[in-house]
Amino acid sequence: MERRGFIKVLAAGGAVAVFPAALSSCSASGVKPAKSVENDYQDIRLKLIAYAMLAPSSHNIQPWLVRLTGSDGFNLYVDQDRLLPKADPPARQIHISQGTFLETFRIAASNFGYRVDFDYFPQGEYSNQTVENKPVASVRLVSDSTIKPDPLFELLAVRQSNKRGYADRQIPASDLRVIRNVKTAAGIGLFADGSKQLKSQLAPILGKSMAIEANDVERNKELANLFRFNEQEAIAMSDGFTVANSGTTGVMRFIVEKLFLGTRKEASAVDSAFAKEGIKATYKQAKTAAAYGWIVTKTNTRRDQLETGHIYARINLLTSKLGIAQHPMSQILEEYEDMSSLQQEFLNLLKIPRGSTVQMLYRLGYAEATPQTRRRGVKDIMLT
């Protein structure tokens, strides 16, 4: 069968969902981790950094750099070689990913009897339109016998961003209330809504947002560079995303990788199977959501983005504890000119006040777990 005909067969069966979430998580409940946490370090900081690297990050790009300071601390920096200037031009999602790292580190530290003191932007906070070679946070560990282990620690190795279509099952109002009641910093609002009206209005907007994102060669190239086209690439790079992370496994994964996806260069084209199936997958994902959650900040500073990451990391763990699948839907939040008109329609739908920023949007529901995305080693993010 020619590739074009084979693509039609796959599409009809809904077999392919290759585009990533904006923040991809590390593993799935009941799925053996692809890479266990390195835990044989003598330096407690390195031990905890290994846990922190399980944090979700934009497109699983893992944009973190760490420089140890003194005997009990470190500075966290944005890895400027891992920015997404086409999909995330102001690096807003990248800075949310710094916050997820810091919160995951704090959760892990509590399990080992340590308090964490954060000093955000110790050399000065920079604009939300730039990325400077300054630490986003200075972190210090303090041994504290009064610290109680955070109950979310046990979820670090099992939570995920689940990209499957979700079951036709309503989320209890009590669970949505738990999500809305997660503790936040001042000026940050949490929302969760499972109403049929919102879902029916939001789904087509999210589908269109993926079509807009895919209608640009340079944006497609960025995503294709993060896609691992086979298991060998996935193991070698230990970042990005794969067919399996979207729920296509076993023999079907082999078929898709060998006969469907083509090359990385081909995937960059706006009419490629990679782009077209990403759009179809997004429509399916949006239509099957049982509910949506979103995080809104009154301002949009780099500190706001870090705080959003702290909150999102906890919500991602909490939904796993509740048995709820979660998946970011962030194309509509991306800040480039051709998204602006549709984005305004989205903001009007959610009644977002002028000047406020939706930092995260994610769908909620129920689905079988998928294999986890991989993680690099601690040594890969260490600065000397």
Image (tube, grey):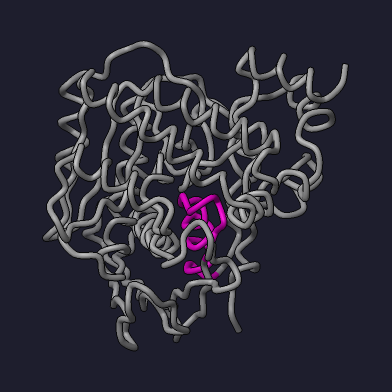
Determine which quarter of the picture holds residue 120.
bottom left
Total labels: the figure holds 0
Relative to 142, is 1 on the left or the right? Answer: right
Q: Residue at x 27, y 48 (%)?
A: 344
Q: Position of residue 338 (x, y in %)?
A: 43, 53
Q: Residue at x 21, y 51 (%)?
A: 296
Q: Is residue 57 magenta?
A: yes
Question: Which one is nearer the viewer's eye here, 28 or 190?
Answer: 190
Question: Which one is nearer the viewer's eye here, 99 or 384?
Answer: 99
Q: Can residue 239 be seen here?
A: no
Relative to 235, is 296 on the left or the right? Answer: left
Q: Position of residue 270 (x, y in %)?
A: 64, 43
Q: Is residue 52 magenta?
A: yes
Relative to 255, is 139 on the left or the right? Answer: left
The image quadrant where one finds the N terminus is top right
102 w.r.t. 236: above or below: below
Query: Bounds of the magenta span?
Result: 43-63
322 w.r.t. 48: above or below: above
Q: Residue at x 48, y 21 (%)?
A: 165
Q: Position of residue 220 (x, y in %)?
A: 62, 50
Question: Which one is nearer the viewer's eye here, 198 or 141?
Answer: 198
Q: Can residue 148 be seen here?
A: yes
353 w.r.t. 202: above or below: below
Relative to 104, is 10 on the left or the right? Answer: right
26 w.r.t. 337: above or below: above
Q: Position of residue 359 (x, y in %)?
A: 30, 53
The image quadrant where one finds the C terminus is bottom right
